[in-house]
Image: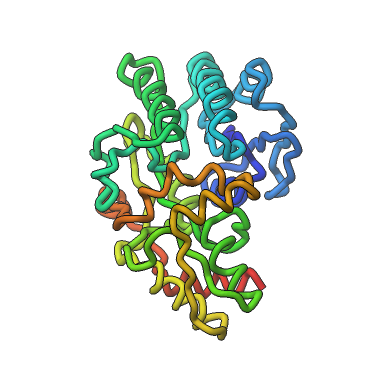
Amino acid sequence: MQTILGANGTIAKVLAKELKKYTDKIRLVSRNPARINESDELFPADLTDSAMVEKAIEGSEVVYLVVGLEYKLKVWEDKWPKLVRAVIEACIKNNARLVFFDNVYMYDIKAIPHMTEDSPLNPPSKKGLVRKQLAEMIMEEVREGKLLALIARSADFYGPDNKNSFVTAMVYNNLKKGKAANWFMNADKRHSFTYTPDAAKATALLGNTTDAFNQVWHLPTDKNALTGRQLVELFSKEMKVKNKVSVIPMWMLKILGLFISLLREMPEMMYQYDRDYFFDSSKFDKRFTFKTTTYQEGVKITVQHSG
């Protein structure tokens, strides 16, 4: 049994399809799970309840933690450590391997222009401190020999059927409405984005590769990172609309945050947009034979599927 915790998210849905290559026993866990494959086992659960987490993991060989909690610092500080602790304990009890789907918030600000799996963990943000805590909780159990786990890290997302991504919300949706695409801070800095189908496919591959465990992996991401303007230009060409970018500076973001709760959470993360942000997945590229989607291909498919 391979179990997906947080089964309704963008990554989880593609992950469930990819896992069919490895097993026909897939359990989907969320408040209201929906079947992706005919043979999927649906397991409705409130993952903030540790007792339900344990029941959801019971009998699993591999557990994929791909939950997306509400993007609020207070929620993260309260719920993330409790959830990860419950998952760790249940995995140890059931002798299950853990695959934790992670982001890059825990890296030192100086690492952002070129992030690798060995970049120092010294986050400049409060959300980053939460992510650092989670990674350390998992890897401590690994070091003590109690848990088999791996951390699969992704850059910011883009891809089809991904309504919550920055690229969809700020670029695609605005261009579709005839408006200028929005970008934070500086549109002339490079910024890596991981294509969501690649991320899910690679996560399934890692979870079914015995020697991939007990380490951190950057998920495959096109090494030819584009600037914000270059990415917007790709979208505008595919959409056949006017190519225009409007840059949102910090002062404007703070004003918008007074009216839009999600943007209120963003100022502490703007260090990721005022400099180059390059996500290096060469470790994965060297270990696996994998065709990483280029930005040109990814944007074309994203536009085709977004309609």
Q: Position of residue 285 (x, y in %)?
A: 29, 54
The residue nearer to you, when weighing 302 against 211, is 302
Q: Position of residue 47 (x, y in %)?
A: 65, 26
In which quadrant of the rendered image does the C terminus lie? bottom right
Q: Position of residue 236 (x, y in %)?
A: 51, 79
In which quadrant of the rendered image does the N terminus lie? top right
Residue 56 against residue 103 in the figure, above or below? above
Residue 65 against residue 18 in the figure, above or below? above
The residue lying at 55 percent from left, 55 percent from top is 165
Q: Is residue 253 visible?
A: yes
Residue 144 against residue 136 in the figure, above or below? above
The residue nearer to you, when weighing 274 against 195, is 274
The residue lying at 50 percent from left, 50 percent from top is 200
- In the drawing, does residue 127 fall left or right of residue 69? left
Q: Is residue 291 visible?
A: no
Which quadrant holds residue 296? bottom left
The residue nearer to you, when weighing 266 against 28, is 266
Q: Position of residue 203 (x, y in %)?
A: 46, 45
Number of residue marks: 0
